[in-house]
Image (cartoon, grey):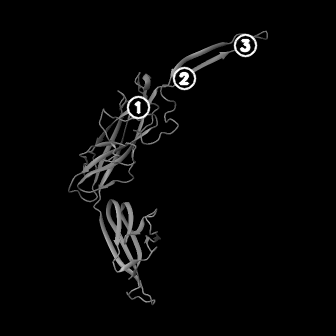
């Protein structure tokens, strides 16, 4: 279930269970004649398993939510920075001091593991991620490998705009005696393939905190005719005149406006002027291609995607009066 590729070099050096053998040879001569060499071998030693891990919150800003909201995910990455394969247990804590509300465990599940089929959280469908069941599918990670983890939360009703809610995700080694033990603690025979395990600097555990923010997003759209050019060089609206539409989209509040898009069906008495779309002053093509604007089926469309708020965008395009 690892999602991120493992680097070539191990974070903690030699792999657990690696045997280290060493021998030395003494040679000499007597009266110019070589004598039989003498060889001495040190006992073979085996590299112990170092138990270490890192857990990080991946979202760059608090995830915007509504109040109420039935389900929203925060993204984390768990990385095994030890030198052997290790199993980890996961636990979330919704009651963090210092915020304005406690997120709840979403009805469909509290923690999910990335399936590796499609990047990003998928609660359902053919690419759905895997509901975490403690003790049943605890992540087992090879040295230096990672697992994307999601906490899926519901948001209470009647919250004020800007209210913050924190969730802390904790991960710990499943090796008995490792979580919380002082660095350097030796756990005889409990490492990979029966070698000794040694607790690393993380004390066999790690945690990371993520946040939600009630967005309270407001949208304002102002559309004007910025210019008129008639066929005689004047500014009269008559057949053949070219109208320039100017649209200002303003988003205020806080959070993320998800799948934010603009659509403007043209009046039946006008014809779109090809190649006239601009977005925030930059020209756009009419085709549905790599830029975010298009014209098709009598409609000018602009796709902004998930948009951090506050934000403002300006769209212009031209039509000819029939």
Q: On the picture, is 91 further left or further right than 304?
A: left
Give the Cα separation between the discs numbered 3 and 2: 27 Å
Against 16, is 275 above or below? Answer: below
For the residues carrying marks 3 and 2, which lies nearer the camera in this image?
2
Q: Quadrant of the N terminus?
A: top left
Which residue in the protein does label 2 denote? 20
Badge 2 vs badge 1, beta-carbon distance below 8 Å: no
First in sequence, mark 3 or 1: give its number. Answer: 3
- Tell me if I can see residue 196 in this picture: no
Against 128, is 213 above or below? Answer: below
Q: Quadrant of the C terminus?
A: bottom left
Q: Which of 41/73 is in front?
A: 73
10 Å neighbourhood of mark 1: few (<14), some, or many (≥20)? many
Q: Which residue corresponds to the image point at 47% horizontal and 41% vertical from the top-left?
A: 5
x and y, in percent, of residue 217 in the image? 29, 63
Which residue in the protein does label 1 denote? 86
- Mark carried by residue 28: 3
């Amino acid at each position: 279930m690892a999602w991120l590729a493992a680097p070539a070099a191990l974070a903690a050096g030699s792999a657990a269970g690696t045997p280290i053998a060493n021998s030395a040879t003494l040679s000499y001569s007597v009266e110019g004649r070589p004598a039989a060499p003498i060889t001495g071998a040190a006992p073979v030693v085996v590299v112990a398993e170092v138990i270490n891990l890192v857990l990080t919150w991946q979202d760059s800003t608090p995830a915007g939510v509504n109040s109420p909201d039935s389900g929203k995910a925060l993204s984390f990455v768990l990385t095994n920075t030890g030198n052997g394969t290790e199993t980890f247990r996961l636990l979330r804590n919704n009651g963090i001091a210092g915020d304005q509300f406690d997120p709840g465990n979403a009805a469909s599940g509290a923690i999910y593991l990335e399936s590796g089929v499609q990047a990003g959280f998928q609660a359902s469908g053919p690419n759905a991620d895997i509901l975490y069941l403690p003790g049943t599918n605890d992540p087992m990670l090879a040295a230096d490998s990672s697992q994307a983890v999601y906490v899926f939360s519901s948001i209470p009703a009647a919250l004020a705009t800007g209210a913050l809610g924190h969730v802390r995700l904790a991960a710990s080694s499943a090796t008995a005696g490792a979580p919380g033990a002082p660095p350097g603690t030796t756990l005889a025979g409990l490492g990979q393939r029966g070698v000794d395990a040694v607790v690393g600097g993380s004390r066999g555990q790690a945690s990371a905190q993520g946040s939600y923010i009630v967005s309270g997003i407001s949208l304002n759209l102002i559309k004007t005719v910025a210019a008129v050019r008639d066929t005689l060089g004047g500014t009269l609206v008559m057949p053949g005149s070219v109208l320039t539409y100017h649209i200002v989209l303003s988003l205020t509040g806080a959070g993320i406006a998800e799948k934010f898009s603009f659509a403007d069906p043209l009046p039946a008495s006008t014809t779109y002027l090809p190649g006239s779309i601009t977005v925030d002053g930059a020209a756009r093509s009419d085709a549905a291609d790599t830029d975010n604007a298009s014209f098709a089926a009598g409609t000018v469309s602009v796709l902004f995607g998930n948009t951090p708020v506050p934000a403002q965008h300006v769209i212009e395009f031209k039509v000819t009066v029939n």
